[in-house]
């Protein structure tokens, strides 16, 4: 677990902020960053859902009134797909019935506007502790390949590699199980959130793209196909 050096501060978190008010979103991102956290922004409910599904976030902060998909629908959809990431809902609607609706939709906390950032930060930190009963790794290495989950950064041999969200999630899962065979079923359930086989070559396509970015130009390949079984990240094999 990567933590801030200040003993009074909380461990660094990776947050998803879904807010359509650009000024408010930038203010909150800056404030969370100053508190030592990493923040991704989404400007509408559909973008927020897509990032959340690809994510690996410690906590989500979701505005209730959003274009394309409202905040309660977003949270309800995530819960329906089995996602348990803690969610704090922000809203100008602060009556008891409004708060009850937010919690019943799957929110873990509900903060009416206007609010003080110090209270928002304290609530987000509390949700992070609730959602992570045990420390999780944020830095994975295999040979000269390094994945920083918190910074959302991948490097090999010191060279930064740009990945799409799904590619990052795929690599993270493979590196979390480095040295082990990862089956197609494991990838479908943990990277794509499918609990059935859609009978497509989506995994093969993504692994091929990932391999071209991770292994191309390097003498030693790190992503290996285990014929008839799945894939494995392992250093030292040719």
Image (cartoon, helix red, strand yellow):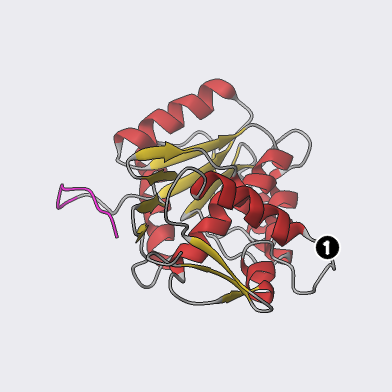
**On screen, 7 above or below 27?**
below
Identify the residue at horizontal 85%, vertical 68% (top origin).
Answer: 199
**On screen, 114 above or below 12?**
above
Q: Is residue 5 magenta?
A: yes
Percent x, y of residue 109: 53, 56
Identify the residue at horizontal 35%, vertical 49% (top origin).
Answer: 122
Compare residues 232 and 40 and report the one nearer the observer: 232
Can residue 83 be spotted in the picture? Answer: yes
Residue that lies at the very extreme toward the top in this rendered image: 23
Tell me which corner region of the image, top left, top right, bottom left or bottom right, holds residue 170.
bottom right
Q: Is residue 27 magenta?
A: no
**Label 1: how many residues lie within 10 Å, few (<14), some (14-19) or many (20+)?**
few
Quadrant location, the N terminus: bottom left
- In the rendered structure, the answer to whether residue 148 lies left or right of residue 7 reads right
**On screen, 211 above or below 231?**
above
The residue tagged 1 is: 200
**On screen, 71 above or below 229?**
above
Identify the residue at horizontal 74%, vertical 68% (top origin).
Answer: 194
Compare residues 78 and 161 and report the one nearer the observer: 161
Q: Which residues are magenta?
A: 1-8
Percent x, y of residue 61: 53, 45
Percent x, y of residue 20: 64, 29
User: What's the magenta bit mostly, secondary-structure-wise?
Assistant: loop
């Amino acid at each position: 677990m990567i933590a801030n050096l200040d003993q009074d501060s909380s461990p660094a978190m990776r947050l998803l902020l879904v807010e359509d008010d650009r000024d408010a979103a930038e203010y909150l991102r800056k404030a969370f960053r100053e508190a030592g956290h990493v923040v991704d922004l989404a400007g509408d409910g559909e973008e927020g859902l897509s990032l959340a599904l690809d994510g690996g976030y410690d906590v989500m902060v979701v505005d209730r009134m959003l274009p394309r998909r409202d905040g309660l629908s977003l949270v309800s959809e995530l819960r329906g797909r089995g996602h348990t990431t803690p969610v704090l809902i922000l809203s100008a609607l602060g009556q008891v019935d409004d708060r009850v609706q937010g919690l019943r939709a799957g929110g873990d906390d509900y903060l009416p506007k206007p609010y003080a950032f110090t209270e928002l930060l304290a609530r987000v930190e509390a949700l992070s502790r609730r959602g992570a009963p045990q420390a999780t790794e944020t830095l994975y290495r295999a040979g000269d390949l390094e994945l920083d989950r918190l910074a959302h950064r991948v490097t090999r041999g010191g060279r930064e590699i740009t990945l799409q969200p799904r590619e990052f999630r795929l690599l993270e899962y493979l590196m979390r199980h480095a040295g082990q065979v990862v089956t197609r079923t494991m990838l479908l359930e943990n990277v794509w959130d499918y609990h059935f086989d859609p009978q497509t070559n989506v995994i093969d396509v993504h692994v091929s793209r990932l391999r071209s970015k991770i292994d191309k130009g390097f003498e030693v390949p790190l992503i290996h196909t285990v014929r008839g079984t799945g894939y494995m990240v392992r250093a030292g094999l040719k």
